[in-house]
Amino acid sequence: MTASVVLLLAVLLIPKINPFALAITGLLLAGILWALIAGSPSVQAAVAVGLVWLMLIGGLRVIVVRKTESDDVAELAKLTWIPRVVWFVAWLAIGVVCLWVGGRVLLGRA
C-alpha cells in the first residue's frame, strides 16, 4: 500500500520536474543501488561514507543558505516567542556539531 502511494505521488510530480534532472537522478540512484547490491564490501563502504558526507555537508549548507528566512524558524518564533536569530543559531550549532562529530567518526579520530 505504501509503495503504491509513493509511486503515485512520484508520477504526479514528474510533469513538474526537468527531464534532464530526472534522468540524472535516476541514473545516480541506479548506480548507487547497483554498487550497494553488487559491489564488493569496500565499494559498499565507500558509497556509504560518501553518502554520509553528502548528508552532513548538505544539512549544514541548507541551514546557512536559508538563514532566518526559513518558514520553520518563523513558525517556531511565533509559537515560542523566542526570536528567529536564536533558532537559527541553535540550528547552526547543531549542524556544526553534527558535522564535527560525524567527520571525526568517519575519519577514525573519534
Image (cartoon, helix red, strand yellow):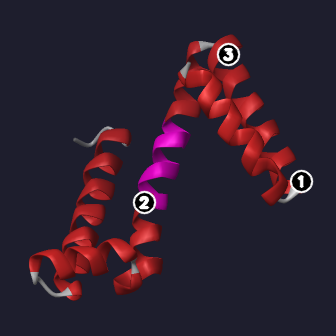
Q: Secondary structure at mark 3?
A: loop
Is 104 located above or below residue 65 in the figure? above
Q: Residue at x 74, y 46 (%)?
A: 12
Q: How many marks?
A: 3
Magenta stretch: give its range. 49-58
* Residue 70 quadrant: bottom left
Q: Secondary structure at mark 1?
A: helix
Q: Measuring from the top left, give residue 93's x and y in whole percent.
A: 22, 69
Residue 36: in magenta span: no
| Residue under pointer 2 | 59
Between residues 78 and 100, which one lies in front from this camera angle?
78
Q: Secondary structure at mark 2?
A: helix
Horizontal side, residue 100 vs residue 15: left or right:
left
- The disc label shown at residue 39, or none: 3
Q: Is residue 17 visible?
A: no
Dot 3 amino acid type: Gly
Q: Measuring from the top left, give residue 60's x and y in whole percent.
A: 40, 65
The CA span between labels 3 and 1 is 29 Å
Q: Residue at x 19, y 72 (%)?
A: 90
* Residue 106 quadrant: top left
Residue 55: in magenta span: yes
Is 83 located above or below residue 55 in the figure? below
Compare marks 2 and 3 and give the one earlier in the sequence.
Answer: 3
| Residue under pointer 1 | 19
